[in-house]
Image: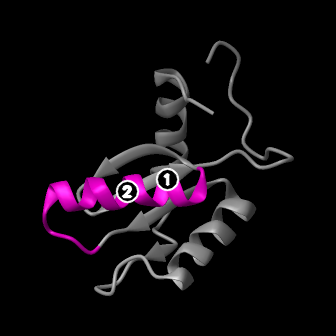
Amino acid sequence: MLLTKKQKHYLRGLAHHRKPSVTVGAAGLSNNVIQEIEHGLQHHELLKVKLPMSNRAARQEMAGTICDLTAAELVQLIGRTCVVYRAASEPGIVFPAGT
């Protein structure tokens, strides 16, 4: 699912007050971390993930890998935090009309 700019804007607003629910450690993206992200996406659809890298290119690559492995869409990447979204089979997040 490709998100429009308006949909991403709406999701950024929803994610603003949430705390990161998954932290990727120095070991990187292990199977356990991917499982935690999967579990979070299944239950919440919208998830903040804290990344370990200080290099911007490495953070972008890791966020892309997370999205590829979980079939999620990258909503935002700011600093060490990325926000990912994947619609559930019964969506809990309903986009407003016109988005």
**Residue 67 image label:** 1
Asked whether residue 63 is in view, the answer is yes
Where residue 43 sits: x, y (%)? 74, 63
Q: Is residue 28 left or right of residue 55?
A: right
Name the residue beneath numbered marker 2. 63
**Figure check: 92 above or below 24:** above
Measure the C-alpha gap from mark 2 to mark 1: 6 Å
Specify the segment rendered in magenta: 52-71
- SS class, disc 2: helix
- Point out the residue furthest to the left here: 55
Amino acid type, label 2? Ala
Camera-nearest residue between 69 and 86? 69
Instruction: Identify the secondary structure beneath mark 1.
Output: helix
Toward the top, the furthest residue is 98
* 76 left or right of 84 in image: left
38 is higher (above) or lower (below) than 14: below
Amino acid type indicated by mark 1: Cys
